[in-house]
Image: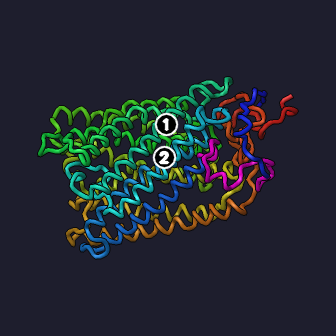
Amino acid sequence: MTQVEFPRNTPPEENKPEMVASHTSHPKAWKWQDYFTFNVDHKVIGIQYLVTAFVFYLIGGLMAVALRVELATPDADLLDPNLYNAFMTNHGTIMIFLWIVPSAIGGFGNFLVPLMVGARDMAFPKLNAIAFWLNPPAGALILGSFFFGGSQSGWTAYPPLSLVTAPIAQTMWILAIVLVGTSSILGSLNFVITILMMKVPSMKWDQVPLFCWAILATSLLALFSTPVLAAGLVLLLFDLNFGTSFFKPDAGGNVVIYQHLFWFYSHPAVYLMILPIFGIMSEVIPVHARKPIFGYKAIAYSSVAICVVGLFVWVHHMFTSGTPGWMRMFFTISTLIVAVPTGVKIFAWVATLWGGKIRFTTAMLFAIGLLSMFVMGGLSGVTMGTAPFDVHVHDTYYVVGHFHYVLFGGSVFGIYAGIYHWFPKMTGRMLNETWGRVHFALTFIGTNLTFLPMHELGLKGMPRRVAMYDPQFIDLNQICTFGSFVLAISVIPFAINIIYSWLKGPLAGDNPWQALTLEWTTSSPPAIENWEVLPVVTHGPYDYGQEHRTELQSSATPEASA
C-alpha cells in the first residue's frame, strides 16, 4: 500500500497530550490514568466505552443469575415479588442501554471508524467525549434507584403501571434513559459526519469497510428513532411528577400512544444492537477465512435497507393492544420483509466461509457461533412477526427465548468476536487462544442450555415477568437456571485472559492477522494521531488472494513513502 503525507491536524499547545513510553515497541502512548479522564482521543473513548459497558454487563449478569435462581423453584424463596420485578426491569435496561449499545456502537465504533476511513480522529472530538460521559451518570441513576425500591414496570415502562409503582425510582430510570438517548444522538451525529466527510480522498465508496457501512446505517436509524423515545419518556415524566395526563387513562390519557412512541424506537433499537455486530461479522469472517467477502455491495446496501424497513415494523409488538386488522396485516408483511436483507447478509457470510482457508481462531469461533444462534433467533422472530402466532405466545417465555437468541447469541457473541479480533490492535498484545476456546465452549453451551428450553416453556403457556409459576414448569426452569450458571462461569476465563494478556501477553506486531483494512496499517496500539503519514488506498479491503494485492505496511515513515 503506497503512502502519502497529508498536513497534520496539530492540536493547540495546551491540548497536546503528554507522551510516554508504552509497553510495546512503539515509543508514544497515553498513560493509563488518561483513560479515566475527559479525553478526546477516539481510541481512548472507544476503550472507555468497552470497559465501562463490560462492568455494567457484569452487574446486569448478576441480576440475571439472581432471577434464574429465583425461578429454579415455583415459589418466591430468594427475591420477594417487588425486588424480583426491580431486578427484571433493570437487568433488561442495563443489558440493552448500558452494555450492548455502548459497546457495539460506542466502543468498537469510536475505536475503529476513524482508523478504517483514514481519519486522525472523529469529526467532533469534544462532543464524542461528552457522549461517553453521559453514560456513567445514567448507570449511577439506575443503580441508585434501588434505594427507592427500583423501577418495577419492566424495561418498557408501560403506563399505568409505571405511574403507580416506586415513583422516585421510576423517575430516576426515565432520566437515565434520556441521558443514554442523548449520548446516542450525539454519537450518531458524529459518526455520520466522520464517515461522509473525513474518509481519505483515495477511498472510493466501494472500498469503505463494511463495518463503517453498518455504523453509518445504525447512526441514521438512531437519529430518526431516538428522539421519539425521548419525547415519550419526557411526557411520562410529566405525568409522574407534574400532574399532566398524557398517559393516564382515568384522566383522558391514552396508554396505547405511549406504546407507539416506545416501540417506534425500541424495535429499531434491536437493529441498533445488531447492525454494528453485522459489521463486525463482515470484518472477522473474510480475514480468518482468507477469502474475499461474498457480495460486498449486497451486504452494504442491505444495512441501509434494514435501516429503512426497520422504521416500519414496530406495531408487531402491539398485536394484542387492540390493533385493527388492517394494521396487523401491514406490520406482519413489513416484519417479514425486514428479514430479507438480514438473510442476504447470512447468505453472504456462509458463501464467504465456503471454500475458504478457515483459521479456527477464537474470533472465528464466536463468529460461526453467532451464525447458528442468530439463525435460530431469526426463525423464531419470523414466527412472532405473524399476528396469529404472536397473539398465542405474546408475553410468554417463547418471546424471552427468541430475543435472547438474537441479542445474547447474536450481539454478545459478536462483541466477543470483535474483542478477540481487535484486541491486538487495541493493546499490542495477543490473547491466549486456549483460554479463548474454553470461553467460547462455555458460552455456547450455556447459551443453549439457558434459552432453548424457554421456547417450550412459552409454547406450554408459562408467562414471562413472574416470580411464581405453576409447578408443571419446574423441570425446564431448572435446566435454564443451570445454563445460567454455565454462562456466569464463562465470563471468568474471559476476564482473566483479558487482564493477563493486556499486561503480559505476547507482542502482537502491527498486523497479526494479515488483514487488509486501514486500521491494520498503523502501529499496534495506534499512535495518538493514528498515522505519521496517512495512507492512500490502492486496493479493496477484502482482496484476499488477489494477484494485485500488496502486503500491508505498518505506519509508514516519510522515508519509506519517498
Looking at the picture, which amino acid does disc 1 mark?
Leu
The residue located at (58%, 33%) in the rendering is 124
The span shown in magenta is 21-45
**Residue 333 sits in quarter:** top left
Which secondary structure lies at badge 2?
loop
**What is the number of the mark on residue 134?**
2
Residue to which mark 1 is pinned: 186
Q: Per the image, is 32 magenta?
A: yes
Looking at the picture, which amino acid does disc 2 mark?
Leu
**What is the number of the mark on residue 138?**
none
Going by the image, does 80 lie left or right of 227? left
The residue located at (39%, 35%) in the rendering is 340
Q: Measured from the top left, where is residue 229 in percent x and y?
A: 34, 39
Q: Main secondary structure of the magenta part?
A: loop
**Looking at the image, can residue 408 be seen?**
yes
Distance from disc 2 to disc 1, alpha carbons, whole Å, reads 10 Å
Find out whether the residues at labels 2 and 1 contact each other: C-beta distance under 8 Å: yes
Q: Measured from the top left, where is residue 150 in percent x and y?
A: 32, 60
Between 110 and 428, the one lying in front of the other is 110
Which quadrant is home to the N terminus?
top right
Q: Measured from the top left, where is residue 422 in percent x and y?
A: 63, 49
Which quadrant is home to the C terminus?
top right
Which secondary structure lies at badge 1?
helix
Q: Measured from the top left, where is residue 291 in percent x and y?
A: 63, 40
Going by the image, does 93 lie left or right of 239? right
Q: Select label 2 or label 1 by which is in front.
A: 2
